[in-house]
Image: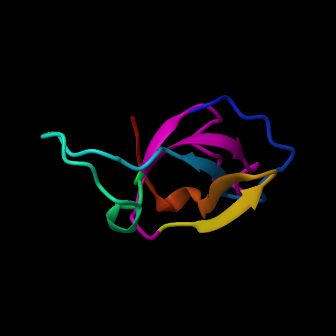
Amino acid sequence: MAKSKVNITPLADRVLVQPAAAESKTASGIIIPDTAKEKPQKGKIVAVGNGKKDEPMTVKAGDTVLYGKYSGTEITIEGNDYLIMRESDIFAII
């Protein structure tokens, strides 16, 4: 994943995530076509909001996180795809 500098600031408890690339091959070497690729559930946080009153953010830009399969809203900024989601949609920092 290329280091990305985005001019966007999520509000409150939202984070901007750059999803990891979908797997293009199985462990045994079978090539997966685009139509059958699973949506990635892992990504890198690019930007974070300031949190809510009495609920500071626990993740920071640069963290690699795991999130739910259908979490977030897909957005495109300057030709790059991102997800914007609430911090509560994140399961873990890895």
- 10 vs 87, left or right, is right
Is residue 49 within the magenta segment?
Answer: yes
Q: Report which quarter residue 4 is drawn in.
A: top right
> Which residue is rendered at x = 51% and y = 60% of the image?
88
Q: Hey, which residue is sitting farthest right in the picture?
A: 7
Residue shown at 78%/59% (left/top)?
Answer: 11
In reply to whether residue 39 is colored magenta, the answer given is: no
Comparing 75 with 64, the one in front is 75
Across and down, in percent, residue 29 comes to: 18, 40
For the N terminus, give its image quadrant: top right
Question: 28 left or right of 17?
Answer: left
> Which quarter of the figure has residue 2?
top right
Q: Quadrant of residue 70?
A: bottom left
Residue 16, position as x, y percentages in the image: 67, 51
Q: Is residue 21 left or right of residue 47?
A: left
Lateral position of residue 48 relative to residue 59, left or right: right
Q: Quadrant of the C terminus?
A: top left
Q: Nearer the viewer, residue 80 or 48?
A: 80
Q: Residue furthest left?
A: 28
Magenta region: which residues? 42-70
The structure residue drawn at horizontal position 87% and vertical position 44%, both measured from the top left corner, is 7
Q: Position of residue 67 (x, y in %)?
A: 43, 55
Q: Considering only vertical position in the picture, is 18 above or below 38? A: above
The total of numbered circles placed on residues is: 0
